[in-house]
């Protein structure tokens, strides 16, 4: 089970509380697959939504393939995500709750198939982000102090 990560949404964990994660297949055209394999994708500002009992991914940018011809893909087109119908309906119910969103965390290839790791997430308030930054800084200072103490002995 070889997994090759193509791109990650690093800001997602900073801006959202991740409640659950799901794996979904990604329906792509040929030139999109080639661009993904070259690592030319961006998940910034992308999100997923359930429409007509289908899961759709918006604002994911996949650069046009360099050796592509006139049949090259549009970089920011809406792409279908592949999940079981029951899972999609469960996600629809959860996203209708107040403040929950479907955010893609990363895109990767698993056994030759393009997959997206989706997160059911709740947006963080500004003070939550500040608390996270303060905790991370404190942890970094403690690690630094311990390392310094060990180095002196």
Image (tube, grey):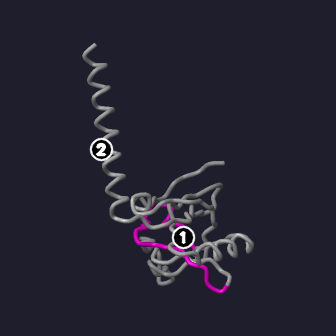
Inter-mark Cα distance, 1 to 2: 29 Å
51 left or right of 124 in image: right
**Judging from the image, what secondary structure is the residue with disc 1 in?**
strand
**Observer-nearest residue: 48 or 78?**
48
Of the numbered discs 1 and 2, the one sitting upstream in the chain is 1
**Observer-nearest residue: 31 or 152?**
152
Q: Which residues are magenta?
A: 30-52
**Judging from the image, what secondary structure is the residue with disc 2 in?**
helix
**Observer-nearest residue: 15 or 85?**
15
Q: Badge 1 local density, few (<14 within 10 Å), some, or many (20+)?
A: many
Across and down, in percent, residue 21 comes to 59, 59
Across and down, in percent, residue 126 comes to 33, 64
Q: Nearer the viewer, mark 1 or mark 2?
A: 2
**Observer-nearest residue: 82 or 142?**
142
Q: Which residue is mark 1?
A: 102
Q: Which residue is mark 2?
A: 137
Q: Badge 2 local density, few (<14 within 10 Å), some, or many (20+)?
A: few
Across and down, in percent, residue 11 comes to 39, 61
Q: Residue at x 35, y 58 (%)?
A: 129
Q: Residue at x 50, y 64 (%)?
A: 36
Q: Quadrant of the C terminus?
A: top left
Quarter occupied by residue 83: bottom right
Across and down, in percent, residue 10 comes to 41, 58
Q: Residue at x 28, y 28 (%)?
A: 145
């Amino acid at each position: 089970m070889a997994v090759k990560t193509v791109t990650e949404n690093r800001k997602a964990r900073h801006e959202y509380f991740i409640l659950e994660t799901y794996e979904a297949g990604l329906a792509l055209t040929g030139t999109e697959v080639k661009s993904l394999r070259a690592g030319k994708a961006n998940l910034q500002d992308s999100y997923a939504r359930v429409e007509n009992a289908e899961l759709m991914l918006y604002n994911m940018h996949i650069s046009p393939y360099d050796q592509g011809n006139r049949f090259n893909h549009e970089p920011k087109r809406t792409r279908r995500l592949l999940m079981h119908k029951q899972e999609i309906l469960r996600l629809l119910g959860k996203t209708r709750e107040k403040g929950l969103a479907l955010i893609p965390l990363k895109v990767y290839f698993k056994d030759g198939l393009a997959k997206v790791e989706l997160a059911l997430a709740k947006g963080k308030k500004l003070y939550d982000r500040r608390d996270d930054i303060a905790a991370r800084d404190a942890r970094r200072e403690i690690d630094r102090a311990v390392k310094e103490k060990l180095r002196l002995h």
